[in-house]
């Protein structure tokens, strides 16, 4: 939409006073949720500069924790939690206030952000946002910068469901928890007079594990949600788990043994197998404690070994020698993030060539398979787009998120006009 039409929408809003957002702003009581954080545009601007934004003009933001029911891998009901982040007028410039009024009048579009791998419960979005004293997280990028409502599920195993083990890189429960959280967040918006777009327009993304969860969730979302999914942007995710497992059993060492043990632990718990069939002692006996939600990745890595094979290696001799015929390989194949049928949603895979955890080849292979199935998929090599030297898995995350937010904002303007 061109600027004169944009301004006309703003004028019409002020004349007729339409839109549900102002009703929410005036509410003192919140239905179905708990406010856990609130930051002004000035607070956001200070943090955003550290994030790498050159822009200085942002919306404020408020974060709410909501709980909902989902199901684990065995089908058992689990009470889970997540965060919904909403742009606000708190401390905004006149220009940003005008833009936000137009968004409220026409309805918010949503971004579902599936977070990357965490180990400690204190790192869960709803926990961290409640305890942090300054703005953090992707709410800054999608809500405070781009004017979306951001939905961030904690996943099973964190937040409200911290007593449950985390089903790491398991497709069924991961995708179901995302779908169920979206429904709960839309219900929260309806109860609290937060105006969404008429078609419930949404975008989905995530980094690392979140990239896997985003792609794993897309098929379920397309088949069971009556919302309009405009774009999916999985970033640096291990979408094809079996090749990832095959590479691990051939490798001498790995820089993140916590990730390897996390997969083994979750799969052994889910499928009722002995963890010693995958992980050697003395490490196998430590995993219940290490994955209790009380330890960070760095602390867990210190209690494991970076060596994967041999007498002092992390992986069992049985797994290394018989991987091709193991139960573990079959379950990795089952939990691939990719659907065999084509997706309706345009998919943009973002990956860094310098990724030292999830190799770039993961993205190229995923693109080929998705294209063969008839899906519309593009692969974006981030270093080429931003003019950077090769970026590691950790270094890639922030610029990937910022690039994604700008793509979503451009798409919203093209599709919705604001």
Image (cartoon, rainbow, N blue to C red):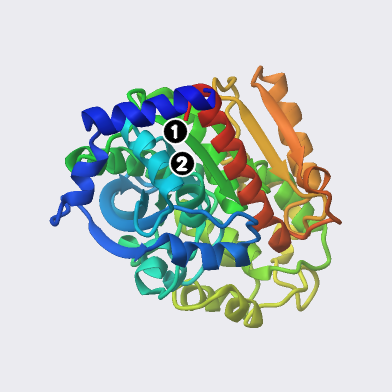
- Give the class, few, some or many, for how many residues have Cα within 10 Å of label 1's Cα (few <14, many ≥20): many
Residue 184 image label: none
* Res. 176 visible in picture: no
Compared across the picture, whether 333 is left or right of 151 comes to right
- Residue at the far top: name it: 374
In the rendered view, tell whether residue 228 sits above or below residue 403: above
- The span from disc 1 to disc 2 (Cα, nearest Å) is 6 Å
Q: Position of residue 349 (x, y in %)?
A: 68, 37
* Of 261 and 46, the residue lying toward us: 46
The residue that appears at 65% across and 82% down in the rendered structure is: 302
Give coordinates of residue 68: x percent, y percent.
Answer: 26, 49
Is residue 355 toward the left or the right of residue 145 in the image? right
Q: What residue is shown with label 2?
A: 111
Q: Secondary structure at mark 2?
A: strand
Q: Position of residue 23 (x, y in %)?
A: 18, 43
**Occupied quadrant, residue 106:** top left
Reading the image, the residue beneath label 1 is 202
Q: Which residue occupies 80% across, 68% down?
A: 253
Q: Position of residue 318 (x, y in %)?
A: 71, 61
Q: With respect to residue 228, does 172 lie above or below?
A: below
Labels 1 & 2 near each other (Cβ < 8 A): yes
Is residue 101 visible to the viewer in this orientation of the structure? yes
Q: Residue at x 69, y 44 (%)?
A: 242
């Amino acid at each position: 939409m061109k600027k004169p039409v944009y301004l006309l929408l703003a004028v019409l809003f002020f004349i007729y006073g339409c839109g549900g957002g102002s009703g929410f702003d005036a509410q003192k009581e919140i239905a179905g949720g708990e406010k856990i954080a609130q930051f002004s545009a000035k607070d956001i601007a200070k943090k955003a500069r550290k994030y790498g934004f050159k822009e200085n003009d942002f919306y404020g933001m408020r974060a709410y924790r909501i709980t909902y029911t989902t199901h684990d891998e065995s089908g058992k009901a689990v009470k889970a939690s997540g965060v919904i982040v909403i742009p606000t007028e708190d401390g905004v410039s006149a220009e940003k206030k005008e833009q936000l009024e137009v968004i409220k009048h026409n309805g918010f579009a949503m971004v579902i952000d599936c977070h990357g791998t965490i180990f400690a419960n204190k790192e869960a979005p709803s926990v961290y946002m409640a305890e942090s004293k300054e703005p953090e997280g992707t709410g800054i990028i999608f809500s405070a910068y781009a004017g979306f409502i951001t939905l961030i599920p904690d996943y099973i195993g964190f937040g409200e469901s911290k007593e449950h083990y985390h089903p790491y890189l398991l497709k069924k429960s991961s995708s179901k928890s995302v779908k169920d959280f979206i429904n709960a967040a839309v219900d929260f918006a309806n109860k609290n007079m937060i105006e969404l777009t008429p078609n419930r327009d949404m975008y989905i993304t995530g980094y690392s594990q979140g990239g896997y969860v985003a792609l794993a969730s897309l098929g379920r979302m397309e088949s069971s949600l009556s919302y309009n999914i405009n774009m999916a942007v999985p970033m640096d995710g291990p979408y094809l788990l079996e090749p990832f497992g095959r590479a691990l059993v051939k490798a001498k060492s790995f820089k993140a043994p916590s990730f390897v043990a996390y997969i083994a632990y979750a799969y052994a718990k889910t499928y009722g197998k002995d963890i010693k069939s995958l992980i050697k002692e003395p490490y196998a006996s430590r995993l219940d404690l290490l994955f209790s939600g009380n330890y960070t990745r760095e602390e867990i890595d210190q209690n494991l070994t970076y060596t994967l094979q041999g007498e002092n290696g992390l992986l069992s001799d049985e797994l290394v020698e018989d991987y091709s015929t193991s139960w573990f390989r079959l379950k990795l194949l089952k939990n691939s993030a990719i659907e065999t049928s084509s997706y309706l949603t345009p998919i943009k895979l973002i990956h860094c060539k310098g990724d030292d955890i999830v190799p770039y080849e993961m993205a190229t292979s995923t693109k080929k398979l998705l294209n063969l199935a008839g899906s519309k998929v593009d692969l974006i090599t981030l270093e080429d787009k931003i003019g950077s030297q090769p970026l590691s898995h950790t270094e890639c995350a922030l610029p990937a998120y910022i690039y994604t937010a700008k793509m979503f904002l451009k798409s919203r303007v093209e599709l919705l006009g604001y």
